[in-house]
């Protein structure tokens, strides 16, 4: 009867058949071969090669679906839909939206539509690299990149994370660093840029003498919205660093600024703080920016001892060395930031 109605009103391209019954879907394959047939499953045992030959998609419980399962089914040419329990909660959407699925069965179509629009407007790029936050303070992470009000535990400076995806939306960029965990990409540097980025953190900068004033921005990845001005004859502390595509950005109190208009002064301090200047002097020539005030940094040279040269270390190992050394170097800052994080949490 269903097949007759669909054919009578020429609705083959407007309907999908969802069913818990594989036998029913087998029959539909004969009667309506061009209509999508979606097999509803509440157990992974029901997904097998025998079933897949009769269906075009799987509709799986939200409690069972994982990114790996979705990717495997996609590789077999099957679409993936998700259904939630009858006690479906709106909060489920905050996680479902992160999955690379093809559709959902929901009691909240308006929420689904709003998330779908945001996802359609975003650009998603796969990444498979490690990285770390190069900042003097922890930064908040998010359940998904579409709702910045849904915050999670903060990411600690220099903690190594694995970046699996980059999402660009509304002139912002986010990295996915875990299941349902995202962070602003502004100050997260991938391993190949860690040696350069970590050198400059917590150092002092000021405008070059020839630069009367400089605009600061909300983000180094989207330098469009301004947040303040860098004033002449004023020292600023570098609070975060982003190295990318031959450009180096510093986060100062007024906002993010490209390094080309600044002079960097390496601090001269006891203990191990000369590490930054050491690392700068041993970077490959093409990674050393030309805006370092070496005259002002000369007192730090008395500590110089030439650490492990970059050309003798593989990039990944060098990144690990940088993070290990930086954690020691900035331990007081990190401990203070973590204490604040716990109080906030």
Image: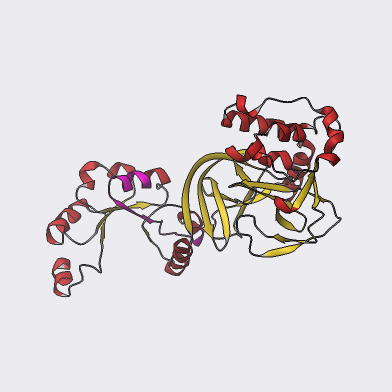
Query: Of 71 and 152, which appears nearest the observer?
Result: 71
The answer to whether residue 332 is left or right of residue 246 is: right
- Residue at figure coordinates x 85%, y 41% from the top left: 296
Considering every residue shown, the one lying at the far bottom of the view is: 9
The quarter of the picture where residue 287 lies is top right
Q: Position of residue 329 (x, y in %)?
A: 76, 34
Identify the coloring. secondary structure
Judged left or right of residue 269, residue 317 is: left
**Residue 80 is inside the magenta segment:** yes
Q: Is residue 71 left or right of residue 35?
A: right
Q: Quarter of the image holding residue 276?
A: top right
Q: Is residue 129 above or below residue 118?
A: above
Q: Is residue 161 visible?
A: no
Residue 277, above or below 100 = above
Count the marks.
Answer: 0
Residue in the picture at 63% in, 64% down: 224
Span colored in magenta: 70-91
Q: Residue 153, position in %: x, y? A: 64, 47
Residue 332 position, x and y percent, is: 79, 38
Percent of width and height locating residue 128 = 49, 41
Examine the structure image and report whether residue 83 is included in the region drawn in magenta. yes
Residue at image position (80%, 30%) is 272
Q: In which quadrant of the rendered view does residue 160 lie? A: top right
Q: Work out whether 268 lies above or below 55.
A: above
Q: Quadrant of the N terminus?
A: bottom left
Q: Nearer the viewer, residue 303 or 317?
A: 303
Q: Is residue 160 visible?
A: yes
Left or right of residue 176: residue 255: right
């Amino acid at each position: 009867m269903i097949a007759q109605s669909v054919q009578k009103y020429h609705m083959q391209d407007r309907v999908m058949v969802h069913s818990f019954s594989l036998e029913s879907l087998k029959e539909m394959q004969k009667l309506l071969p061009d209509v999508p047939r979606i097999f509803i499953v509440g157990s992974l045992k029901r997904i097998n090669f025998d079933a897949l030959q009769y269906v075009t998609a799987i509709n799986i419980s939200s409690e069972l679906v994982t990114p790996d399962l979705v990717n495997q089914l996609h590789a077999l040419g099957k679409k993936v839909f998700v259904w939630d329990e009858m006690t479906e909660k709106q909060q489920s959407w905050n996680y479902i939206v992160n999955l690379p699925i093809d559709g959902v069965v929901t009691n909240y179509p308006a929420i689904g539509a709003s998330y779908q629009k945001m996802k359609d407007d975003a650009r998603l790029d796969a990444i498979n690299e490690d990285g770390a936050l190069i900042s003097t303070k922890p930064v908040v992470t998010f359940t998904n990149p579409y709702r910045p009000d849904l915050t999670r535990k903060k990411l600690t400076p220099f903690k190594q994370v694995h970046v699996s995806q980059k999402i660009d939306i509304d002139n912002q960029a986010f990295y996915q660093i875990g299941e349902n965990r995202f962070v602003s990409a502004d100050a997260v540097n991938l391993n190949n840029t860690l040696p350069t980025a970590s050198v400059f953190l917590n150092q002092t900068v000021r405008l070059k003498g020839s630069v009367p004033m400089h605009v600061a921005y909300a983000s180094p990845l989207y330098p469009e919205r301004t947040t303040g001005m860098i004033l002449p004859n004023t020292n600023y502390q570098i609070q975060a660093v982003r190295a990318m595509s031959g450009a180096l950005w510093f986060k100062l109190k007024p906002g993010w600024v490209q390094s080309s208009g600044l002079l960097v002064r390496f601090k001269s301090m006891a203990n191990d703080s000369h590490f930054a200047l050491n690392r700068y002097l041993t970077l490959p020539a093409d990674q050393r920016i030309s805006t370092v005030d070496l005259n002002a940094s000369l007192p730090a040279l008395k500590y110089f001892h030439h650490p492990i040269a970059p050309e003798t270390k593989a990039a990944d190992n060098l990144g690990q060395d940088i993070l290990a050394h930086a954690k020691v170097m900035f331990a007081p800052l990190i401990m203070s930031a973590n204490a604040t994080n716990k109080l906030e949490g």
